[in-house]
Each structure stands twice: as C-alpha cells, then as structure tokens.
Amino acid sequence: MWNVYLKRASGALLGTKKESKNPHRQSEALDELKRIVGLETKRCPMDKAYFSDPKNVRADLEEFLKQSGKKTIAELTTGNPECNIEIAARNGERVRFGTYLLRATVALGLAKNHREAGGVRLKTLDELKKKIGLDIKKYPEMDAKYFEDKENVRKDFAAFAKTYGCEVKKLSTNYDGKTTVCANGERVTLDTYLRRVAVGLGMAKGHRGAGDKKAKAVDELKKRAGVDVKNYPMESKYFWDTENLQRDLEAFAEACGRGIVELSMSSKYMSKKALCSNGEVVRLQTYLLRAAVGLGLAKNHKEAGGKMAETLRILKQKVTSSEK
C-alpha cells in the first residue's frame, strides 16, 4: 500500500523509524523521493512560518469550509466528519483537516509531537482563527470543578440527548459526530466531552489515554446527574458468562440480519449497534475491543484492535459449545 511505502521511505531516508507513521514525515519522504528521481518539488513545508502567515491560514480554512457544509470559518470544529475533509492546501499538498491541525499544533509549539497534539487540536484551531482576525470566545474550563457541579452535568447530558434524539439514560460512547453547546457555552462532540470528563475526574492522565475510560465516564456522570445506572461493567467476569454472550451475539446477529455463525469482521457489521446484557447499547467493534481486554487477549483497546478477529472466533465458540 502507498502509505506503507511512504512509512518505510520515511524511516530509511529521514532516519525516523519511530516517527514513520507521522503524516508530516511521510510528506517530507515523498518530496525526497521526487528529488531522487529528478522531479522538481515546489511545495513549501507546513512549519511555523507557514502557519504564522494569515494568507496561508485563511486560504486553507476557506477550502476546508467549502467542503464542511458550515456557513462560516468560525463554525469549524475538530469533530468528525470535519477532520476527515481533504483539500489541496495553499502549499499544493493534499491534506486532511485532522492532519492539518496536528501539524499546526506542533509547528506553533503547542505540542512536542503528533502524539501529544491530538488533545489540543481545538486550542490550535482557535489559534488559527485568531491569526485571521476572528474573535474567539474564552469558555470556562471543563475541569474537575466543572464536572462536580451536578447542574452542569444535567444540562450537558440533556443537551446531548436532545442532539442525538435519545433519552439521557441511553447515552453511550457510541454516539458521536455531532456537536452540542454545553453549560459553559462551548460547542463540543460527545467524544471530546467524555475524554475531558475522564481527565478532569482523574480517570486518565491525558486526552489520548482517555479513550478507554469513556464508558466509565458516562456512567459516572449519569450517577451525578441522578440517572439510575443499572448496567455493570464489561470486564473479565462479564465475558466468561455464556448467558451474557448468547444474548449479546444474538442481538448483534439480529442487528446485522445474519446468524451468529455468520458474524464477521466486515465493516458493515462492525458499525452495527445492539442492546447488550448489561443494559448498554454498543457497536460490535466496541464490544469486541472490550471482550479482547476482558478475556486477557490484550492489555488495552489499542492492543485489542489487532485481536478482534480472534476475539470474535472465541466468543462464537463459547456460545456454540454451550448450546450442545
């Protein structure tokens, strides 16, 4: 695949094996390859000078705006699907909005590398908006004090429930992609909100590490908002209970329009949601990630990504063997 080729080129030509997945380094590697075969590269790098030039920033943000469906640059956010929008930037390079913000974050000194940059993209976007003269509102920080205020939590959950057209008690980590105005006046996605909850309440050290704690964050806030949380966590004990597995896989099979044995890693199945035995509505992909950790096949969700096929096979075996 092309991206694999560029990762290898980045490691070989730029000595960046540990950073070869960095899209910016892959771009540099591509330029180097073009120079090797005698092609002229007029592209200027997306560095501090690039992002400090209002003309570059305005031109790029206007291009992203055209494809976002929003009316003004001020409405652009860091949520999906905007981060997947791809444009031809002013330097001639094709880049996704998410990658663009990661590069800007590092170039402007707001993070040391792309790994750290993921948690501050919203701050970066605000900085870019300021550079083209937009007035950026300052919102009260969503910290421990914010989330300890039950009124804030009630208002926020009510707003998210209205946005997704569901009851507060049914809100889960599977709802994302839409933004909601919270009690502090800031518009964020549920994913961003839950990551902040996890960090604010001490469940995770940083935004990136908060991904595995979002389900726990949902339950904690529901309790604070006065919602009765009856479900129990999908941990090791849960996935060794064949009755749970039977009900869950039957629910997913029904959602996919297939039998349990026909469930597979197909992307059209991974996005399907089902009501599980613990009362939680989750996607099949999320379920398999949790199962991989619960069954001891992986230490965390990041490792679990490569174990989902094996996990699904084991779950099917547990269910089918219990039926005999």
Image (cartoon, grey):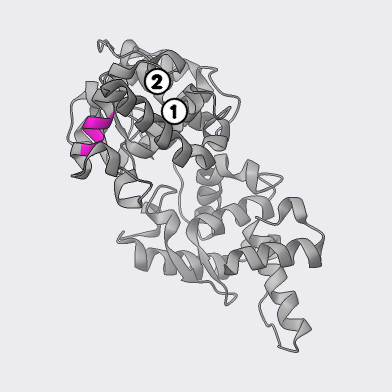
Residue that carries the numbered disc 1 in the rendered image = 290
Q: Position of residue 218 (x, y in %)?
A: 37, 22
Marks 2 and 1: CB-CB under 8 Å?
Answer: yes
Residue that carries the numbered disc 2 in the rendered image = 239
Q: Position of residue 227 (x, y in %)?
A: 25, 13
Residue 138, compared with residue 4, is above or below; it is above
| Quadrant of the frame with the C terminus | top left
The residue under the point 30% across, 51% down is 268
Q: Callout 2, which amino acid?
A: Phe
Whether residue 251 is in magenta: the answer is: yes
Q: Callout 1, which amino acid?
A: Arg
Q: Earlier in the sequence, mark 2 or mark 1?
A: 2
- Image quadrant in which you'd find residue 316: top left
Element on which disc 1 rests:
helix
The residue under the point 37% across, 53% down is 81
The residues tagged by marks 2 and 1 sit, at their Cα atoms, a distance apart of 9 Å
Q: Closest to the observer: 278 or 192?
A: 278
The residue under the point 71% across, 45% down is 112
Residue 200 visible in this rendered orientation of the protein: yes
Of badges 2 and 1, the one in the foreground is 2
Whether residue 1 is in magenta: the answer is: no
The stretch of residues the image draws in magenta is 249-253
Q: Position of residue 66 (x, y in %)?
A: 36, 68
Q: Main secondary structure of the magenta part?
A: helix
Q: Position of residue 207 (x, y in %)?
A: 55, 33
Name of the residue lying farthest toward the front = 324
Indicate which disc residue 43 carries. Answer: none
Residue 101 shown left or right of residue 276 in the figure: right
Q: Residues within 10 Å of mark 1 (few under 14, many from 20)?
A: many
Residue 155 visible in this rendered orientation of the protein: no
